[in-house]
Image: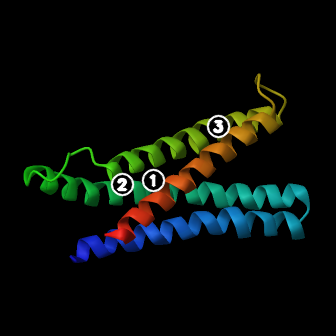
Amino acid sequence: MTTLARCTQWLAGLWAGALLCIAFLAAPAAFAVLASADAGRLVGRLFAQEAYLSLVLVVLLFAFERKRAMADAQAGRGSVLSTNILLLLGVLFCTVAGYFAVQPMMAAARAGQGTWSFGALHAVSAGFFGLKAVLVCVLAWRKGAG
C-alpha cells in the first residue's frame, strides 16, 4: 500500500470520527450544560469550523482520489468517475447546501424574515449534515477495505 493510499485512509477515518463526535458528543453536551442560547452559539461555531474543514478535506481527498481513479482508468480497471469521487461530490454538495446555503436562511428566520421557519430550516440543515456523515463514513469504510 502506498503512502498516498494510507494518507487517504487516515484522513477519511479521522473526518468520519470528527463528524460523529460533533453529532453525538459535542452538540448534545453543549445543550446539556449550557443555556439554550449559549449552546446554540457554541454549536453554531462548531458547525462553522466543521464546514470549512470539510471543504479542505474534500479538496484534498478529491485530488488524491482523482489521481488514483485516473491511474485505474488508464490501466483499464475502472472509470475516472469512481464511487469514491461520487461520494466526495455528494459530501461537497451537502456541505455547501447544508451550511453555506441554509445557515444564512436560518439566521434570517431567527430574525423573523423569510418564508421557512427556523425549525424547518434546522431540520433541513440536520438532514444535510446527517447525509454528509453517512457519505464520509461510507468513504472511510471503502478506503479501509482497501
Q: Position of residue 28 (x, y in %)?
A: 79, 64
List the residue tagged with mark 2: 59
8 or 84, nearer to the observer: 84
Q: CA distance from mark 3 to mark 2?
A: 21 Å
Q: Is residue 65 left or right of residue 15?
A: left
Under mark 2, the amino acid is Val
Quickly name the residue at label 1: 55
| Cβ–Cβ under 8 Å for marks 1 and 2 | yes
Distance (Cα) linking label 1 and label 2: 6 Å
Picture coordinates of residue 2 (x, y %)?
21, 76
Element marked by disc 3: helix
Whole-percent x and y of residue 70? 16, 52
Q: Residue at x 57, y 59 (%)?
A: 50
Give the numbered dot on residue 66.
none
The residue located at (79%, 26%) in the rendering is 113
- The residue under the point 77% across, 22% down is 115
Q: Check the picture and name the quadrant holding the N terminus.
A: bottom left
Residue type at mark 3 is Val
- Circle 3 residue: 102
The furthest residue to the right: 35
N-terminal-most mark, 1 or 3: 1
Using a 10 Å C-alpha cutoff, classify the residue at mark 2 as few (fewer than 14 neighbours), some (14 to 19) or many (20 or more). some
Q: Quadrant of residue 133?
A: bottom right
Q: Is residue 99 above or below residue 136?
A: above
Indicate the position of residue 60 as horizontal and vertical percent values.
34, 60
Say whether marks 3 and 2 touch (CB < 8 Å).
no
The furthest residue to the left: 75
